[in-house]
Amino acid sequence: MNQSKEFAIELFQALARRLNVKGDSVNKAQLKQFWDQISDESFDSRLQTFFDMVEKDTDERITKEEVRESISLSASANKLSTIQKQAKEYAALIMEELDPDNVGYIMIYNLKILLLQVPNQSVN
């Protein structure tokens, strides 16, 4: 139950950032926009929602620290203590893959390219 509440709060905050909503409440029009975003099953919409949940400072870039925090929170919510302890290492591996130019951040198109190519490759 607690993890569901934490997820709901993270989702609300991500949607609020995207729509530039201030405060802890929304009006009917904003609620409709929230609903439209979370009920849209398209790949691009789902990817944008995920990106918004990880990317907290609205600069349209995911940093290594935001990746680490996301891994750690997800591992904690799913009671995966080993992964939580190694979140920093996993974040470094993700950044190595998605930030090959070592600019210090990931853009949404980096994630999209990776996710769209994975089904065509075999995983060892």
Image (cartoon, grey):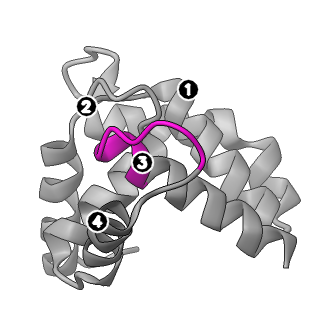
Q: Which residue is mark 2?
A: 60
Residue at point 39%, 40% (across, down): 17
Q: Which residue is mark 3?
A: 16
Front tag of 1 and 3: 3
Earlier in the chain: of badge 2 and badge 3, it is 3
Q: Amino acid at mark 3?
A: Ala
The 10 Å Cα crowd at callout 2, few under 14, some 14 to 19, many 20 or more, is: some
Earlier in the chain: of badge 1 and badge 4, it is 4
Residue at point 55%, 53% (across, down): 25
Front tag of 2 and 4: 4
In the rendered structure, does residue 22 fall within the stretch colored magenta? yes
The quadrant where residue 113 appears: bottom left
| Rendering coords of residue 109 (x, y %) | 13, 46
Q: Which residue is mark 4?
A: 29
Task: Measure how far apart labels 1 and 4 are at the Cα level.
Answer: 34 Å
Looking at the image, residue 121 sits to the left or right of residue 98; the answer is: left
Looking at the image, residue 34 sits to the left or right of residue 72; the answer is: left
Residue 23 visible: yes
